Image (cartoon, helix red, strand yellow):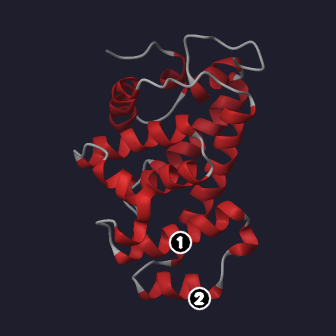
Amino acid sequence: MPYIDVDPNLPGIRSLMAFSPQTAEPMGKIANLMLRTNEGLTMAEREMIATYVSYLNDCFYCQQSHGAIVSCYLNDDNKLIDQIKNDYEQAEISGKLKALLSIAGSVQKGGRHVTEEQVKKAKEAGATDKDIHDTVLITALFCLFNRYVDGLATNTPTDLSTYPPRAKQIAEHGYGNHIFSTPQPA
């Protein structure tokens, strides 16, 4: 049961965005800036980082939501996301993304956990300064988003079939107030 009075029909961060539109707007903008571009990292890779960080933070809602978005982008059935969660080093992803996930895992623990060796390895695997920057920022954002969702005990659907319809809507139209306050698509 949520700790504050939010719309019980809106799960996770959606209920919080509807509760506080003034904070929803900038949060939606930064989500779009960081997740809805193929500059350097693809949108799928960006969502993989968000999903992995949400998994590390044990935020069920966010890892399911963003994992479903990855599946939309890749026409996948969550197989790749499951591989990343279980052991990203063995997952069918690029060496660059593996190195960036290592950095994300360190940032999730605390910014000072990132090492020069991790950055060097990422660059050797083809990561640009922008890729490293965006990985750190996506990780920091998802630490915030995860704590926002779980810190207020939002409603979290356990029925995994509820995540793909919203994921499809986000993959097609992006993040924004329309996503956070409209009914679940069929």
The residue pinned by badge 2 equals 117
Rendered location of residue 73, percent (x, y):
29, 46
Amino acid at dot 2: Glu
Rendered location of residue 170, percent (x, y):
40, 33
Q: Which labelled disc corresponds to residue 68?
A: none
In-image side of 91 versus 21 (left or right): left
The residue furthest front is 86
User: Can residue 139 be seen in the rendering of this structure?
Assistant: yes
Front one among 23 and 89: 89
Q: Quadrant of residue 108?
A: bottom right
SS at circle 1: helix
The residue furthest left is 75
Residue 61 to residue 180: above or below = below
Marks 1 and 2 sit apart, C-alpha to C-alpha, by 11 Å
Rendered location of residue 77, percent (x, y):
26, 42
The residue pinned by badge 1 equals 102
Residue at point 35%, 38% (across, down): 171
* Mark 2 closeness class: few <14, some 14–19, many ≥20 residues within 10 Å: few
Amino acid at dot 1: Ser
Whether tag 1 and tag 2 are in contact, CB under 8 A, the answer is no
**Mark toward the start of the polypeptide (1 vs 2):** 1
Q: Quadrant of residue 75?
A: top left
In-image side of 74 versus 180 (left or right): left
User: Can residue 40 be seen in the rendering of this structure?
Assistant: no
Residue at point 24%, 46% (across, down): 76
* Mark 1 closeness class: few <14, some 14–19, many ≥20 residues within 10 Å: some
Residue 132 to residue 82: above or below = below
